[in-house]
Image (cartoon, rainbow, N blue to C red):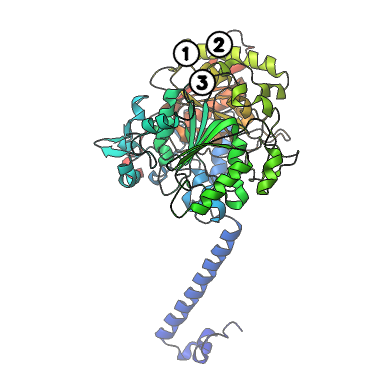
Amino acid sequence: MGHANLPPGRRGLAAGAGSNCSFFDIVSVVFLASVIVFIVLIYTALDTSSQRVIAPSIVDPRQRERILSIFDSASAVSSSSSSMLDACPAKEVDNMPCEDPRRSSQLSREMNFYRERHCPLPEEMPLCLVPPPKGYRVPIPWPESLHKIWHDNMPYNKISERKGHQGWMREEGPYFIFPGGGTMFPDGAVQYIAKLGQFISLNDGHIRTALDMGCGVASFGGFLLKENIMTLSFAPRDSHKSQIQFALERGIPAFVAMLGTRRLPFPAYSFDFVHCSRCLIPFTAYNGTYLIEVDRLLRPEGYLVISGPPVKWNKMEEEWLDLQAMADALCYKLIVVDGNTAIWKKPSGDSCLPNLHNFRLDKCSDTDDPNEAWYFKLRKCVPTVPLSKDLSISSLPKWPERLLKPPSRISLIKIGFDTFKDDTQNWAKRVAYYKNTLGLKIGTSHIRNVMDMNAFIGGFAAALSPDPVWVMNVIPAHKQLTLNIIYDRGLIGVYHDWCEAFSTYPRTYDLIHVVGINSLIEDATSTKDRCSLVDLLVEMDRILRPQGIVVVRDSAEVINKVTRIARAIRWTAEVHDSEPGSDGSEKILTATKKFWKLVANSQ
């Protein structure tokens, strides 16, 4: 039976009757067997990939366990060279575990699912340190970095070659230069912003938080900073290689994301202003799902600006009519159509809900939480937001007053108003202690991009507001969802689960701050952690710039463990008492990432 497919003259050979076989016969059988084995392996791999994404790199689980066990031991010797984590290979200089093209290329293209986050399992994560590229230098400080960066820090010429004529960027000697242009504003963001300012009051303090979708190198958001507008820019990791990496190197708030099948990681009514400049999002596709998501994010009385397709775009007349009809169904007021730029204003409150049926739109059920947005599937319904009448732009104080005034959504947390007052006062004292006693260089040109990994209601970021920094406030997705309060204060941030890699490139933050680092990995329902503290610090190292600073506040026991790991990942670390007036239960770790490079034979 095993030889039914062999020619009759070969059956004796296959059965072991070798008296009449020739060398050619043997070679033929071996070749045929090899082909069969190859085909079986290929089909097995294809079948597996349809069920589970194949890991792009091979990780030895036993080696991972050995490394983790070293740091779980209280007697681990931090100075031992055997406890030092190795560098990743040179090809991993831009490693993004959850946006890895080697992984995403195997996934469905429907609704751009493959461009969303897709993370490896913990046991697939290599415990190694991402190296800087050859020729890397300490980044150019802000505000000079808005206009130029070191070429060798991200030596990718694709955008400059393809988009240089539109004013995106150009190579000039050892630098990339950013004139401030974009596809829809090749003459520069300054002129474009001035044009928008004819129809939107951008400089009177009412507009503070903005979202730029499909942002390119984020020049629009960068130049809006001059108007005291904090813009969070996003784009996927796609054919425009490293566009978000360029934005962050420039010191502009940005992160990697894709509007595909899930809600973007923000609460409802986060942004005063949403902008799309040739972002190519099909807003009315899938029964208007994408425009409904924009509506969830846009604050009442906020502005939506779409510049480029489909606005009065050749051969997109039907899409343009659909967009106008759906915006009208949501009761958006069309302010102006100027060339290929359209500006709408969202109504206040829920006044439009009865009109949704005109476009076959439904109101979401009362059980739908509009603030949930971590791996949350997009809904084809319009949510109702609690306290919406108090969240319109005209109901909020102007910037900067709104930073320190308790917003209405603070009432949704226990003893919210007292908590807001105490938190604001405590962080003012703590930041002064960081600067004056611990000697952190906050407020100098050394620190521009800051992350708070466990931001609560944004007190740390609020205390930094006088300094030339921006803060990515991260609210852990498994904790109380307080990110809406942060946005009401005029600050920005995202939801995230720290058992996964963050959606950014390596070497993008100057300062990473975290209170209660152990709470980020704890499982509230079990005594076992959800993930490893070692993996978390390796991830922090990935996104921290060489010579960047880490500040960790936690119990003495946790800080001791963090210190052991910090030294193993090539950080210099010091432990301090907490500031005077605190309860004394916390210790503070300050650490600096060493500027190391791969040795020649590691390339």
Q: Which of marks 2 and 1 is nearer the N terminus?
A: 2
Kindly identify the residue that appears in the image at 71 percent across and 30 percent down: 386
Which residue is label 1 attached to? Answer: 435
Label drawn at residue 367: none
The secondary structure type at the circle numbered 3 is loop
Q: What residue type is labelled 3?
A: Gly
Question: Label 2 near label 3: C-beta < 8 Å?
Answer: no
Question: Which label lies toward us, 3 or 2?
Answer: 3
Q: What element carries label 2?
A: helix
Q: What element carries label 1?
A: helix
**Relative to residue 508, is residue 242 depicted above or below?**
below
Closer to the chain start, of discs 3 and 2, is 3
**Labels 2 and 1 touching (C-beta < 8 A):** no
Residue 322 screen position, x and y as percent? 56, 49
At horizontal 52% and vertical 67% (from top left) the residue drawn is 42
Residues at marks 1 and 3 touching, judged by CB atoms closer than 8 Å = no
Name which residue type carries label 2.
Lys
Name the residue: 46% across, 45% down: 237
Q: Quadrant of residue 278?
A: top left
How far apart in space, not on screen, are marks 2 and 1 (Cα)? 10 Å
Residue type (three-letter) at the residue carrying disc 1: Lys
Measured in 3D between alpha carbons, the distance from the residue under mark 1 to the one under mark 3, in whole angstroms, is 29 Å
Question: Which numbered tag is attached to residue 429?
Answer: 2
Q: Is residue 545 visible?
A: no
Crowd around label 3: few <14 · some 14–19 · many ≥20 (10 Å):
some
Residue 187: image location, x then y, percent: 33, 36
Q: Nearest the camera: 307 or 263?
A: 307
Q: In which quarter of the image is residue 148?
A: top left
The residue at the far left in this view is: 173
Tag shown at residue 205: 3
